[in-house]
Amino acid sequence: MNEASDTTARIALVTGGGTGVGKAVATELSRAGWCVVLSGRRQAVLDDAAAAISAETGGDVMGIAADVGDPASVKALFRVIEDQYERLDLLVNNAGISNSAVPLEDISFAEWSAVVAANLTGAFLCTQEAFRMMKKQTPLGGRIVNNGSISATTPRPFSAPYTATKHAITGLTKSTALDGRPFDIACGQIDIGNAASDMTAKMEKGVPQANGETAVEPTIDPAHVADAVVYMASLPLDANVLSLTVMATKMPFVGRG
């Protein structure tokens, strides 16, 4: 039976959902009763994650490989979701990559383009397709949550491509929230500081600081981020968390480090 025939089913898509923060978010959404679609580039990783989450939560979880930076791939992803579930209630734009920690002038155009495609273009393309579904489905509307990172406000050394895309995500979030108003589409942003993942593993050995030193930084369990996303997603569509920061309390961020 198609899940869309169950009027209580809520359908969520989590990009970058096979590992790290995305997997943690998908797990807690599933635990909260959402039907969850995971997307990422590697189908085997997605299949393993979907099976593990489903075994833990008993929920409906599936993985669909997609390159969020490629318009055709994104369209195909949303076509499968529409065919399978007939609606989408939540999009979590989580997919993203960082850049090499090298001086700004040494970053190649290829690396710049890859970071922009994964972090910014991907979020835009997925938002675009979500709008198309959410504007025509019944009931109307849905919610979009963007992973902004604390780099959406404050850069790290040697992070120009990543920081530029995360600053841009803030603009995309606000534009999406504004343009979505007439259609009951709410959009908010979660800025994450040092959630433990493959991307932040290097912090255990030390990362460059703004004063030129290298320092070990504390991290937090990504489950705390997942809990925050589940809260944002639980609100009725007439309420929205526009911006929320979840960070390691003692990380160098507030003030001068």
Image (spheres, rainbow, N blue to C red):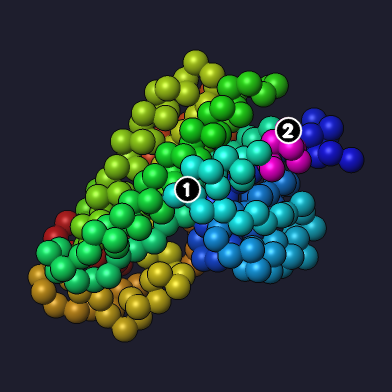
Q: Percent position (x, y) of residue 120?
A: 37, 46
Given residues 47 and 231, the one toward you in this image is 47
How far is mark 2 from mark 1, CA to CA? 23 Å
Residue in the picture at 79% in, 34% down = 4
Given residues 60 and 150, the one toward you in this image is 60
Residue 184 appears in the rendering: yes
Query: Label for residue 86?
Result: 2
Q: Which residue is mark 1?
A: 70
Q: Earlier in the sequence, mark 2 or mark 1?
A: 1
- Element marked by disc 2: loop
| Front disc: 2 or 1 | 1
Left of 235 or right of it: where is 166?
A: left
Q: Main secondary structure of the magenta part?
A: helix
Q: Is residue 42 magenta?
A: no
Residue span colored magenta:
80-86
Residue in the picture at 24% in, 71% down = 101
Give residue 254's quadrant in the image. Answer: bottom left
